[in-house]
Amino acid sequence: MRFSPSIRRCLLPISILILSICPPVPAQQRQAQQMDEDFAKSVKEWTTRPEFISPLVDHLPKVAGVPSPKDALGYHIGTPKKLTRTAEIYKYYRELASKSPRVKVINIGQTDEGRECLVVVVANEETVKNIDTYRGYLAHLGDPRKMTEAQAQEVIARAKPIYHLIGGLHSGETGPPEMLMELTYRLAVEDSPIINTIRDNVIVTITPVAEPDGRDRYVDWYYRHKIDETGEQDSMGGPPYWGKYIFHDNNRDINYSQVTMRNLLEWYLQWRPPIMHDLHESVPFLYTFSGQSPQQPALDPILYGELPWFSNFEMSQMIKYGMPGVWTHGFVDMWSPGYLAFMSSNHNGMIRMYETFGNGGANTMKRKVAPPEGAGQTSREWYRPSPPYKEVEWSMRNNTNFMETGVLSALQLTSQFPKVVLENFYKKSRNSIEDGKMNAPYGFIIPTQANMTGVQFVVNTLRLQGIEVGRLTGEVKLKEGSFPADSFVIKRDQPYGRLAKILLEKQNFPDQNLRTYDDTGWTMGLTTNTPVVEIADKAILNAPVAPVDRLEIKGEMKGGQGAAAYAIGNHGSNNLITLRFRLKDLKVQANELSFKSGDAEVPAGSLIVAANQPDAYNKVKAAVESLGLTAIALTSMPATPMHEVDMPRLAIYSTWGNTQEVGWVRHAFDKFEVDYDLIYKERVLQSKGQGNLRDAYDVIVIPNQGRSAKGLVFDREPARKPLAYTKSDQFKSHGMYGESEDITGGMGLKGALEFQRFVEAGGLLVTLGHASFFPPEFGLARKIEAGRPSPQFYAPGPIVEAEILQPSHPIFYGYAQKMIPVRYANGPLLTVPERDREQQVLMRFPGSDKSVLSGLMRGVAETRNRPAIVDVPTGEGRVILFATNPCYRWQNHGEFAMLFNTILHHNDIKTIEKKPAQNAEVK
Ligand SMILES: [Zn+2]
């Protein structure tokens, strides 16, 4: 880095830290600025109780030439029955930016459906004008390796913290995108001590709508079906989709698979805001996150001091203004690193989060806040000294008042201590590097291995998060062994060394008695079935490496055009299914046993393409090279038994009520170029009971959805009127990914019967996770029992060992080991009759303490010897039940291949020879 001479000379006086605390906007100081009387009157009217507003938000300045939200939208923020679509929101910010030098709009990419992703900057004129300079200061503080301590202090003296706000990540939480428009306007124009100090000392950046596709779909749904709701009793629920694939899981996308989430991460790594604040809606009246246990111990302890510092300040300010129901500490924890805004704490910044009470729209309604029994979140606790009311009439404007007052208080605190925030950010970045030099593990090594596309996924996912990865330029010898050149090395003495540790190490959940909000285990090497070696030898820090930007594995065609056939080796790469679909015009076979060709071992389940097909050489070459696979030329067709890998006619079945886990499977199939139809009850029940699923499909996958078989079959309860999800001029975002005149009611018993007919006529039905309750309970696999664990059992997404019992079954092609790591999915505890176990149980859970590889499973013995995958011949077809979910959130890539194999070899799955039952171990 370079410092200009002026920076070297200029150390800001320490007095900037000792600014006096400002009183809340005294009326006489506002007199100079004209206020919007209509705003004050309207807001007072829409606020359902006098204590639900604060002196920070009960007024709005009117400034000639600068448009307020009402000037642009035609209504004030918080107007009953008004929600704003993304295009109008963006139009407002752009109008504001065109009139105010204090506001700037930045495009950061596009969504799946082609909407823009924006970030808005608001600060004083000087800051906005020199925004790239300020951005540069934060880049230095975020990676202080080339700075001395003194230089860092010089940068801190010049820099300003960025405070980033996110609204609209969850589309049903409709308030934040509205509130943020008013906040931005207020920050741009208001002349008051609090706002002036914020504007001068802080750079506020805003994601106006974090999920633009979902926002528009939800707003359309609101105007179509929810505008007449009067209360909880007549709620029409939400639309079947938010974004293209997922709902709330956009806040669980640990590998940033979704393009909209990835846009924000890329922006984050360029701007490095020390604080990122995600605005949600759920609990009453305003919950401000303070990072309760279980806490991720790898993160800097400074963070755990900062979190309650902010949340307690907000709580005390709002209580001072007379606002009830503001609390902290008791909701969501600091364990999983996978929440979207955790990108900040994962990168040495600070995650902040609110839950504000909301009505799922803009209707004012009576709400029961306490549960029927007990006080729930209305009890008085040490962290909730002024609890929410047990019943309340709630409005959109209340939501705006609470959230905006909270955010302004957080910005006020930041503006009073900007240098402390910057110093902490710098110190956490510095500590991350130092921690990697002082504490084991000092690094991780990913050896080159047979399945290099798995390595590619791990390396590129780490790179996406800004983690530095190197490739050994020569062999290194460490206590853990010697590693050849080309092995991948992640050293811990880097700014994001803590994050590398969090993602790659085993998760040791701290206390069996604690509960957590999401997954307890995510160890990347285990979820992807990619060996990663943890290194406790400090010498790793000096290993010679060449930096890896993005890893592209180039596949190889070994041998020329004169061959008899090409064998694409199956070493577990998920790309084999992509290859099959890319070669759909060619006949492709699979060898059922491994064989040798020269020195090369061709594992069972490799893909064999006879060379005498039109343009076979060029097609195979193009596919393997781009997919990172290796093909070898065979001088003759192999003599081992083979079967044809027929193109499957494939469907995914989705309920209308639970599309998210289906969405993750769709996303994986789309990414791996697997062709499928997405079908709903409408297709299953087509033509008055003549669904004829078997005429159209060879394989139907029912992803994990609903909580039970009943939920899968009967789905959403009918509402007081049909809930249409059809495209129209008025509701353009509807009818995407499927259309229905009424999404309620489910497929019912008639639908279950159609699935039975499908299987009996020779179809293959594949059920994942919870969907595996369906075949046993609705007669498609009636000899199987599907049970549930005891109430004491608790398994929030641990990674456990599973044992392959039938290694030659096509489902396990490419898996070299007998024991593999799988994510435990809380699917059914299956029981297979003893006489069928040896034939039908393909994989089981050993269920011992040592088989929990990462994360928490309380009551592991309940899973002991329970089937993990069952293959049940039924009629002419079969049902394959996964108690696991082999396609979970773009995370367990090490399990995807079992699902892909099932699809590829759908009509070549044979039941093993029946022998007298002897394996009584399996339940
Ligand atoms: Zn939310």
Image (cartoon, rainbow, N blue to C red):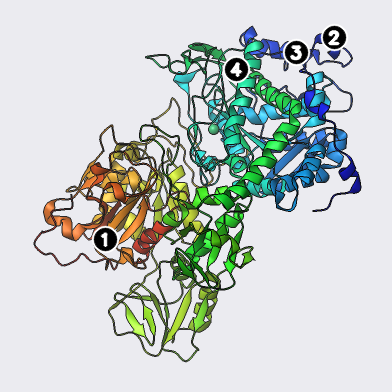
Above or below residue 897? Residue 186 is: above
In the picture of the structure, the residue carrying the numbered disc 3 is 40
The local secondary structure at tag 3 comes to helix
Gap in angstroms between the C-alphas marked 2 and 3: 16 Å
**Marks 1/2: CA–CA distance:** 81 Å
User: What distance separates the C-alpha of mark 4 from that of mark 3?
Assistant: 16 Å
Q: Residues within 10 Å of mark 1 (few under 14, many from 20)?
A: some
Q: Amino acid at mark 3?
A: Ala
Q: Which residue type carries mark 4? A: Ser
Side of 736 where 403 appears, left or right: right
Q: Is residue 52 left or right of residue 577?
A: right
For the residues labelled 4 and 1, the Cα–Cα distance comes to 55 Å
Q: Nearer the viewer, mark 2 or mark 3?
A: 2
Q: Secondary structure at mark 2?
A: helix
Q: To which quarter of the image does residue 608 belong?
A: bottom left
Label 2 sits on residue: 28
- Does mark 2 have its CB less than 8 Å from ligand 1? no
